[in-house]
Image (cartoon, rainbow, N blue to C red):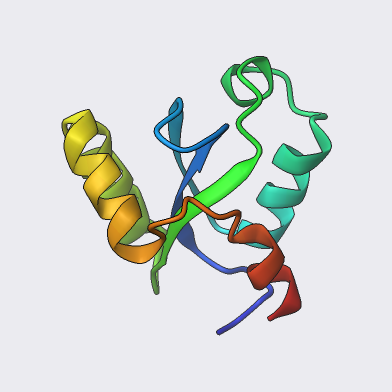
Amino acid sequence: MREEGLIAVYMLSNHRHGTIYIGVTGHLLQRMHQHQSGHTPGFVSRYGLNRLVWYEVHDSIEVAIQRETSLKRYLRAWKIKLIEQQNPGWNDLWTDLVRG
């Protein structure tokens, strides 16, 4: 897995079955550091969404943006199912990502 410039669609939450945020970035590690540090004002910091519960890597930012748009249209139950297929305990995947 490439660490620099990791293009991904990701979901953050504050706890199991909590508020879900869907984002896309061309630099997942850098973006997660921004979210974790709380230096970026907005929805994520307002609701304390600091747990990376799901992510999907893509080869191009265009494909990632299309996937993000699609996921945002999903029903909440579908998003939860998608998270739980990859991460049933809603663990913070950030630590695994950083360790490589």
Q: Left or right? Give the position of 36 relative to 26.
A: right
Number of numbered discs present? 0
Q: Position of residue 73 (x, y in %)?
A: 18, 32
Q: Position of residue 1 (x, y in %)?
A: 55, 84
Q: Quadrant of the C terminus?
A: bottom right
Q: Left or right? Give the position of 30 relative to 18.
A: right
> Residue furthest toward the front?
89
User: Against 83, is 87 above or below?
Assistant: below
User: Against 32, is 21 above or below?
Assistant: above
User: Against 39, is 84 above or below?
Assistant: below
> Residue furthest toward the bottom?
1
Which of the 4 image quadrants contains residue 91? bottom right
Q: Position of residue 74 (x, y in %)?
A: 17, 35
For the residue pair 17 and 2, the one nearer the viewer reads as 17
**What's the residue at 69%, 23% (across, down)?**
45
**What's the residue at 41%, 60% (across, down)?**
87
**What's the residue at 65%, 15% (across, down)?**
46
For the residue pair 13 and 27, the one nearer the viewer reads as 13
User: Against 63, is 66 above or below?
Assistant: above
Q: Left or right? Give the position of 81 relative to 87.
A: left
Which of the 4 image quadrants contains residue 43? top right
Q: Position of residue 12 (x, y in %)?
A: 52, 40
For the residue pair 95 and 28, the one nearer the viewer reads as 95
**What's the residue at 32%, 45% (across, down)?**
68
